[in-house]
Amino acid sequence: MKIAILALQGAFEEHRQMLLKLGVESFLIRNLSDYQQPKDGLIIPGGESTTILKLLKDLSIYDLLKKDIENGLPVFGTCAGLIMLDSNHLDTMDIVVKRNAYGRQLGSFYCEGEFLGIDNKIPMTFIRAPYIVSAKENVKVLSVVDGKIVAALQGKQLVTAFHPELNEDTRVHEYFLSIVSA
Amino acid sequence: MEDRFTLNKNLAQMLKGGVIMDVTTPEQAKIAEQAGACAVMALEKIPADIRGAGGVARMSDPKMIKSIQNAVSIPVMAKCRIGHFVEAQILEAIEIDYIDESEVLTPADDIYHIDKRKFKVPFVCGAKDLGEALRRINEGASMIRTKGEPGTGDIIQAVRHMRLIQSEIRRITSLSEDELYEAAKALKVPFDLINFVHQNGKLPVVNFAAGGVATPADAALMMQLGAEGVFVGSGIFKSGNPEKRAQAIVKAVTNYDNPKIIAELSEDLGGAMVGINEEEIKLLMAERGK
């Protein structure tokens, strides 16, 4: 199994470390020729969604990525990565997302919450985070914190509004890998 | 509960691989955001003009900072004077995303930096060497940047600081454990921070390059030297074509190790900022705060 990590901007190294810990091979995508390498799944990390979107388009990756996800490429988006898959961006998930939904940095927070399919609570770090305002019925809600949807699954697309890559707990990444190998 | 310091370090992690641009108006902020900046630094005058104007440089008008906060969705940073904790309190009150306790402004205190642990909002501070970086982190800074000479368009100082910090980190990594106490004493920093560097081979917070970045090649140079991202101050809005240059620098930071891409990006950018070299400077801002 080989997982690609979109490394245009943001916390991609943290995802790489997570996969390393799990003994999974990965590579970074910084441009089109990186993108064209074979991969079994893709992670879109946290960072600034405006920056990542701009670079995806300018580097001619955007349309290919959209097509690949629609053709079943497993993808895991955290924070900005979640925003990238919503109805206003790549539009591969039937979700409407609110950006900076908790306000500025003073609104960033940490908590522990339930995650459907994972036993016991998991650590959740929200940094200037978005949340999912609404999701169509084909979207499976995996986690709700304070009444807001913060993790969801649609087909082979997994998204979290929080950053599992910032904590030691590897279970959300393992959850994604189980989707990749399914 | 995870503490604010961790959350603030985490925000800096999200900025990695990105470019933070100095802006003085909402219009410039929008240009920066559309060019792919991962954050903007709101200030009344860019460093080149602060240098030109002379006199005392202070925190910007909060109204002007708020107008930039309202103009963009990316994080907004602002500068306060070294040691001026009330300016920092004001910036926290308007919910700034990051405070830069900056040598670009005229220092308010020649002995004490701000006790940054008392604040909920994050701080970034400049450092010329490892000791300075770790002292700032000990005071509560959750992000570090080099103190390259601002407003000059001359990269030499940023290079010097980044090389020195990286080489000191390598030296600490190679020490035996019983030598770490002496290293902590020599660098005037707590043992725990030295021990972290020894075990991890890096700073405990994100480290950006700042000061003198004027071209895509400058930005890529700093990244290859170990910076995790880049601040660009005067380099963009003092140049011939800010929009194009801003985009090129953003892309150069992403593909910093790909000379072919950087060559393409470097074409036809119009005039870079004129710049002054370090021998021509009367005021060395990097010497402010140790």
Image: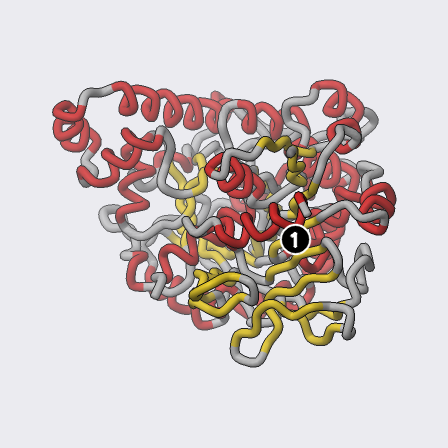
Query: Residue B175: horizontal and vertical position, in percent?
Result: 22, 20
Q: Quadrant of the C terminus of chain B?
A: top left
Label tally = 1
Q: Quadrant of the N terminus of chain B?
A: bottom left
Q: Which residue is mark 1?
A: A77
Query: Residue B255: horizontal and vertical position, in percent?
Result: 68, 29
User: What chain is tagged by disc 1?
Assistant: A
**Residue name at image x 84 percent, y 51 percent:** A70
A56 sits left or right of A48 in the view: right
Query: Residue A33: horizontal and vertical position, in percent?
Result: 78, 27
Residue nearer the viewer, A132 or A172: A172
Residue nearer the viewer, B253 or A127: A127
**Residue name at image x 71 percent, y 40 percent:** B246
How packed is label 1: few (under 14 Cα within 10 Å), some, or many (20 or more)?
A: many
Q: Is residue B44 visible?
A: yes
**Residue name at image x 61 percent, y 42 percent:** B19
Residue type for callout 1:
Gly
A91 sits left or right of B96 in the view: right
Residue nearer the viewer, A133 or B183: A133
Label 1: element kind = strand
Quadrant of residue A110 within the rendered picture: bottom left
**Residue name at image x 56 percent, y 71 percent:** A102
